[in-house]
Image: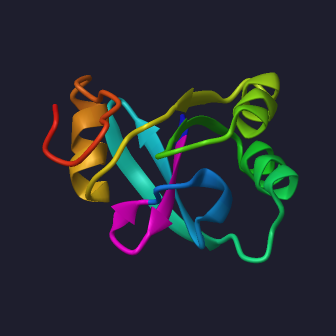
Amino acid sequence: MKLAIPLFGPRVSPRFDYAPRLLVLSLKEGKVVSREEIPLNPLAVWQRVEKLKELGVKVVICGGIDESSKCWLVDHQIQVIPLVTGEVGRVIKDFLAGRLRAREMDGVT
């Protein structure tokens, strides 16, 4: 399975549509087997969604996301886990452990 996280530095980007980079992880048996960073600028939102589809991404973990972007992702059979904040490493660990939850601000679990 492939998982994608829009990045802003070492953190989950606060907005899906403005993230400068995307981290794509390949997961197998609950472990990360590969990771790749992909530049997203200057892609429009629909191009970002198409890129995720081309890459075979099945889940997107992101911060804020507008309703139309979320609908486009869902229409392409991509699950969206929105309103997630924090350091990417912690978010990945929480996802793999099955304890990832949307957060309104850092430190709230």
Q: Residue at x 81, y 33 (%)?
A: 72
Rendered location of residue 68, percent (x, y): 79, 35
How many marks on residues? 0
Q: Position of residue 105 (x, y in %)?
A: 26, 44
Q: Nearer the viewer, residue 103 or 47?
A: 103
Q: Residue at x 42, y 36 (%)?
A: 28
Residue nearest the viewer, comparing 19 with 99:
19
6 falls in the magenta region: yes
Q: How is the image coloured?
A: rainbow
Lateral position of residue 107 relative to residue 98, left or right? left
Is residue 55 placed above or below 36 in the rendered structure? above
Write the residue at 60% across / 73% down: 20
Residue 57 picture quarter = top right
**Residue 69 on the magenta segment:** no
Q: Nearer the viewer, residue 42 or 54?
A: 42
Name the quadrant of the N terminus: top right
Q: Which residues are magenta?
A: 3-12
Residue 6, image x and y in percent?
A: 53, 57
x then y, percent, for residue 75: 82, 24
| Magenta stretch: dominant secondary structure | strand
Asked where in the image residue 96 lies, by quadrant, the reply is top left
User: Which residue is drawn at the image coordinates 47% and 64% (left, top)?
Assistant: 7
